[in-house]
Amino acid sequence: MNMKFFFSFLLAINFSVAFAQPADVQQLLETARSFQRSADYDNAILVLTKAMQAAPENTDIIKELAFTYYMSGQNDKALAEIKKLVDKEDADEKAFQIAGNIYKTRQDFKEADKLYKKGLKLFPNSGALYSEYGDVLYQKEPGTISSIKMWEKGIESDPNFSGNYYYASKYYGTIGNNLWSLLYGEIFVNLESYSTRTIEIKNILFDIYKQWFIAGNSKGSSPFEIQFAASLNKQSKEASFGLTAEVLTAIRTRFIVDWFHGNTPRPSFRLFDYQRQLLQEGLFEAYNQWLFGSVVNTSVYQNWVTTHAEENTAFINFQRGRIFKIPAGQYYGGK
């Protein structure tokens, strides 16, 4: 490139940035996010730095720059940027999330604790902040119950944020509370159906069902917990010859029939309503194959998908065509 032309080109860029309008700043943000998605953090930082020259007080630019520094491993620079926002009273929820992740990466639990407490005062119904705060507390003190209190509060306050169910299901599985590990785990995979965490929880669910029928279960003390345990225990004979996706389909079918047609009134629970809907639509077997078969034995599952292609496609279309949401007032608590 002709050097004279090159310097003229750089001058033009700097001039355009200096006099950028809001629309231009938005375009720079989108360009930076595109670089982020491809993990080209150097170029994202370059673009965001230019955008900062045009709009130094733009909070979106500051958050994106802090996040990009964080993703590129430059935590000191990331913290310096995000503190410009979280030190203000009008900081938004995302700013606290970014700052919290930086402190967690730095293992600075003291500052993380102060940050999340401040954030939750401003955003008391933030499922994301409860989820991440609980994770920090668990890393800091794995043997205490402080973390599960955060995750339970997050589930109660923001029932459609998946992260709290993820952590709570794992936590309850490790302490032998099979009941809430099962319920929270299955809610999680319906809220977050296609991620690496989904596969992890599917495996946990299958293991917890085995534990339930082999080593007993945690019945709990609330009416909901007692009714759930009693209905599931009625199906224990079905597990006498081992658990497979097919056996679990039978167990869970009988459970739903008992739950909705027993003599005792049952509390409303979205997960069970969804299972009943799948039964009515003729899709419950496909759902259970997706939930358990896909992790128990992949070759057997693939054979099932091949031989039940129409049913499997109908379920996938049904699943992706609807948003699974927990209505307000259905929190029964695992504490």
Image: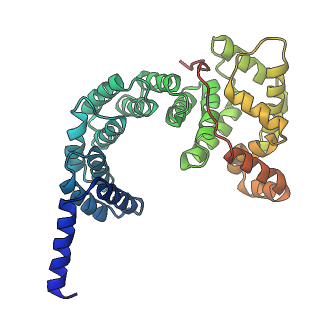
Out of 198 and 66, give the one closest to the viewer.
66
Q: How is the image coloured?
A: rainbow
Q: Position of residue 258 (x, y in %)?
A: 83, 22
Across and down, in percent, residue 121 comes to 33, 22
Rendered view: 285 above or below 2:
above
> Residue 71 appears at what percent x and percent y?
33, 53
- Residue 287 located left or right of residue 31: right
x 68%, y 39%: residue = 206
| Image quadrant in which the N terminus is located | bottom left
Q: Where on the picture, by quarter, is residue 292?
A: top right
Name the side, left or right, on which 216 lies relative to 235: left
Identify the residue at the far bottom of this view.
2
- Residue in view at x 55 percent, y 49 percent: 196
Q: Nearer the viewer, residue 163 or 250?
A: 163
- Whether 284 is drawn above or below 310: the answer is above
Vertical arrangement, residue 199 with respect to residue 86, above or below? below
| Residue 241 can be seen in this image | no
